[in-house]
Amino acid sequence: MQGTKAIAVLGHGAIGSVVCERLLAGAVPGARLDCVVTRRAAGAAAPDVAVPVVTADEAIGRADVLVECAGHAALAAHGEAALTAGTDLVVSSAGALADGSLGERLRAAGPGRLFVTAGALGGLDVLTAAASAAPFTTIRLSTTKTPAALVQDWMDAAQKEELARADGPVVVFSGPAEEAAALFPRSMNVAATLTLALPGAPVEVELIADPAAARVTHVVTAAGPIGDYRFEVRNHPSPANPRTSRVVPYAVLQTLRGAL
C-alpha cells in the first residue's frame, strides 16, 4: 500500500451505505471515500451522503478504486469501463460473474485490477488449497433463507403464493450453481463465489425457503482425494435487505484492504 487512494462506491443501499460509513470512519487505512454513485441525480442534495454524488463515469475518472455495491446490472454497465480506464474494481455482486460473457470480459479487461469479495462465505482458502492438489469429486452448497427473501420477479402467482403460505422448509431450487445464480441473482452470490474459487468444479446447489429461518445459513460440503470438508455459516440478515447477510459490507471492506 502506498499513499492514500481515492475510493468511489457504486451504490448506497444495504451494502454500500455501510461501506461508505465505515470508510468515512477510517476503517480502511490508506483509503479515502471520494464520491458515491446513487440513484439520485448527480449533484443532487443528499444529506445522508457526506461526499459528492456523481455519475458512474465521473466516479471512474475520479477514483483509484471503484467498489461495486449496486447489483448485477450496475456491474455489467460499468465494471468493464472502470477496468479499462485503469481503475481497480472491487466486486460484491459475484453472482454476475456467473454470466460467462461478463465474467470473461471483466477478467480480460485492464489495466485496472479485478477483486471479488467472498461475501457471506468462509473456508475458501482451505477448499482452494485442497482443489489445487486434486479435484473434488463432490461439492454441494445448501442455502436457507426466509421465503420473502427468495421471491423472484420471474415466479408466477402460484409460486409466489406457495412461498407466502409455507409453514415449513420448502426446497425452492436444486441444481447447478450457475443456474442458481442466474435464477436468484440477489440471493446466490455465494454460489457464484464458490464456483469462481473452484473453476471447473461441478457445484450443486440446494436453495431452501424456511419461514422459521432467523439467520441466513450456508452449508458447504466437499469431498475429494485430499479430504472431506464441511463449513456452516449462519449470518444475520441485513436489517435493510433480508436478501443479503449483515456481514457482506464488512467482507467488501476486507477485500478493499487487500486491493490497496
Image (cartoon, rainbow, N blue to C red):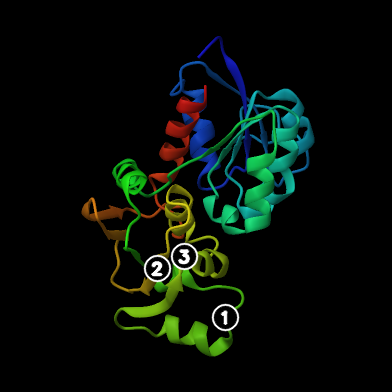
Question: Tag 1: residue type?
Answer: Met
Question: Tag 2: residue type?
Answer: Glu
Q: Position of residue 257 (x, y in %)?
A: 46, 26
> Is residue 221 visible from the viewing direction of this image?
yes
Task: Please tell me the numbered disc located at residue 1.
Answer: none
> Is residue 241 visible from the viewing direction of this image?
no
Question: Tag 3: residue type?
Answer: Ala
Disc 2 element: strand
In the image shown, does 206 or 61 lie closer to the viewer? 206
In the image shown, does 157 or 196 lie closer to the viewer? 196
Q: Position of residue 248 (x, y in %)?
A: 43, 45
Q: Position of residue 246 (x, y in %)?
A: 39, 48
Q: Are marks 2 and 3 in contact (CB under 8 Å)?
A: yes
In the image shown, does 209 or 24 lie closer to the viewer? 209
Residue drawn 40% across and 68% down?
205
Q: CA distance from mark 2 to mark 3?
A: 6 Å
Q: Which residue is mark 1?
A: 155
Disc 1 element: loop
Q: CA distance from mark 3 to mark 1?
A: 19 Å
Disc 3 element: helix
Q: Residues within 10 Å of mark 1 (few under 14, many from 20)?
A: few
Residue 189 is left or right of residue 165, and the answer is right
Residue 155 is left or right of residue 163, and the answer is right
Counting residues from the start of the chain, the first of labels 2 and 1 encountered is: 1
Q: Which residue is mark 2?
A: 204
Task: Please tell me the numbered disc located at residue 177.
Answer: 3
In the image, farthest residue toward the bottom: 158
Q: Position of residue 125 (x, y in %)?
A: 33, 40
Residue drawn 55% across and 41% down?
16
Counting residues from the start of the chain, the first of labels 2 and 3 encountered is: 3
Residue drawn 56% across and 9% down?
3
Counting residues from the start of the chain, the first of labels 3 and 1 encountered is: 1
